[in-house]
Image (spheres, grey):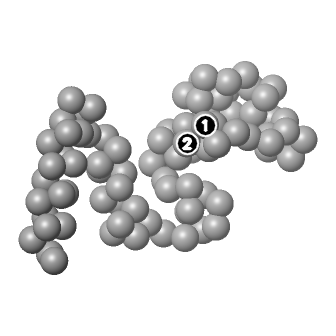
């Protein structure tokens, strides 16, 4: 990826000084900031925090999270139907 500190701060919508403080361990990040970092880098939180690669379930969940809200009732219905078939 090769982002400069300035570009990475811009993509995260934070100041360069804040990012420098995080890098030095003087400031913690919020869960929301971790999510933003994951989105910018295209990595999972597990990978960033623990070095674990994404599993199929994590990828599936990421795809579900990208579904437009208007389609969530339909998704719920499909999941319910599939669960009923699995019994």
Q: Is residue 30 left or right of residue 57?
A: right
Residue 2 shows in the view: yes
Label 2, on which residue? 35
Q: Looking at the picture, how far across and down is residue 21, in whole percent? A: 84, 36
Q: Residues within 10 Å of mark 2 (few under 14, many from 20)?
A: some
Residue at image coords 21%, 48%: 76
Q: Is residue 9 above or below residue 63?
A: above
Q: Is residue 37 left or right of residue 87?
A: right
Label 1, on which residue? 32
Quadrant housing the C terminus: bottom left
Under tag 2, what secondary structure?
helix
Q: Nearer the viewer, residue 6 or 66?
A: 66
How many numbered badges does the structure rendering display? 2
Tag 1–tag 2 contact (CB < 8 Å): yes
Q: Residues within 10 Å of mark 1 (few under 14, many from 20)?
A: few
Residue at image coords 34%, 44%: 65
């Amino acid at each position: 990826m090769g982002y400069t500190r300035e570009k990475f701060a811009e993509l995260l919508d934070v100041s360069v000084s804040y990012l420098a403080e995080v890098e030095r361990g003087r400031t913690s990040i919020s869960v929301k900031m971790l999510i933003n970092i994951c989105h910018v880098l295209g990595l999972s939180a597990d990978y960033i925090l623990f070095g674990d690669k994404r599993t199929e379930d994590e990828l599936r969940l990421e795809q579900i999270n990208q579904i437009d809200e208007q389609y969530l009732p339909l998704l719920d219905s499909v999941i319910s139907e599939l669960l009923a078939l699995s019994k």
